[in-house]
Amino acid sequence: MGRQGRSVAEPATPLAQIAWLVLAAMPLMLAFANRSSVLVLVIAALVAFVGAGLSQGLPVVVEHLRGIVRSPFGLLFLAFLLLALASLTWAHDRPRSAFALAEAFIPALAAIALGAALPRQPERRAVPMLMLCLALAAIEVFVELITRLAWREALGLRATYFITNKPVLALVLLYWPLVPLTKGMARRWLLLAALAGVIAVTVFTSVSGTAMCALVSAAAAFVLALVAPRTARWAVMLAVAASLLVAPLKGELASRLIPDRALDALQSLHARDRVNIWLSFGEVVAQRPLTGTGFGSSAVVVRDPVASEVAADRRTLLDVGHPHDMFLQVWAELGMIGAALVGAALVVLWRTLARLGREQHAAGLAVTAAALMIALVGHGAWQGWWIAVAGAAVLWLWARPPVGGPVVHEEGAR
């Protein structure tokens, strides 16, 4: 996120400090309330916006917002928002699509507001606070898993293992920005290694195969980026681009290339079901290739007239709620136009990553690799909790280390 006329070493006001600390509490809040990330992000945005308005004046904050909107990412975000709004005119269930749009764009707009209102350099307690909250969240989830969610059952709360998946995925995404943010901190590598170990134990104790794949992919991308930055960037970004391009054909490719024995062996992960779901939504793309069926329509596409155009043996699986592939969901709901905007965003992401310093570049690629794995096999694309966590990860990546005095721009990764 770009910003004009503001020093990266500007000290945080009291309300900005509070906003950073609220943001740091997100993983721990998710461990207890697994959809709370949106609320955390919105509260942090409100606190930061009020603080910036009081300390700098509202016109200055508005100018910061305008700078973000005029940036390449900002323009693409605005175009995507306008496309999503326009798609309500051809969506079959407009109230449901409007609700999905609000769920997705409220946390996205909150993250943008934070980018405009927060000083880029958090105060000194924010990063240790984030480390502590990640550790406590990992420990809390681990205890829940090994005690079979005992405290939730004792309180009469919903007690299914899947409720731990959201905080576990947040752990995987929010850990990596700590690497550049802890620069200058005493015993940083020991602390980072210990935290990584705690998170890894929780992830591999969980029932989230997505989180396991995301953690392994992120770690591999991070290590490769430290050794060979350009190779890592090419590998990760080509994987993301290929995933976007082949998404409409993913079901056909998987059904032809993956042996039945492999699908049977992975049945505990519902592998065959996922392939069939990809086939069903791939047919939706084929019927509405340019514009899709409307933002957020995947949840009710089985009631859309397009369902009658899908082969009868594949129609039932349109009722699963989403395609279990975020790229395929973009194609199905917003068609080629939406996919083109996502592709343009990937180009901007490539250029942005290339300009980062070594550790920040490696952390950014790790977050990108983790997000890619989550996008390929995870939940619906527009779930608010997920967009809030991703927005928080971007904000922490965008921040400068709060220790060691003013920070200078590093040479871009090679």
Image (cartoon, rainbow, N blue to C red):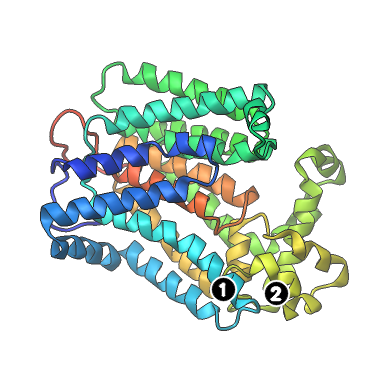
Q: Looking at the image, is 222 positioned above or below residue 354?
A: above
Name the image quarter holding the C terminus. top left
Tell me: 377 left or right of 126: right
Q: Residues within 10 Å of mark 1 (few under 14, many from 20)?
A: some
**Does the rendering let one see residue 248?**
yes
Q: Tell which residue pokes out farthest to the bottom in this image.
A: 89
Q: Percent from the top left, x then y, of residue 157?
A: 65, 38
Q: Nearer the viewer, residue 195 or 113?
A: 113
**Residue type at numbered disc 1:** Met
CA distance for labels 1 and 2: 11 Å
Q: Residue at x 34, y 46 (%)?
A: 395
| Image point (32%, 52%), residue name | 45
* Rendered position, 320 above or below 263: below
Residue 340 is situated, as x and y percent measured from the top left of the image, at: 50, 70
Chain-order first, disc 1 or disc 2? 2
List the single residue furthest toward the front. 155
Horizontal and vertical percent for residue 198? 51, 22
Task: State the SS at label 1.
Answer: helix
Above or below — where is 241 with respect to 201?
Answer: below
State the image quarter where residue 287 is shown.
bottom right
- Callout 2: few (<14), some (14-19), or many (20+) C-alpha neighbours within 10 Å? some
User: In this view of the protein, which residue sits in the foreground, 279 or 43?
Assistant: 43
The residue carrying mark 1 is 336
Q: Secondary structure at mark 2?
A: helix
Q: Amino acid at mark 2?
A: Ala
Q: Which residue is mark 2?
A: 286
Q: Count every numbered label the image shows and give the total.
A: 2
In which quadrant of the rendered view does residue 298 lie?
bottom right
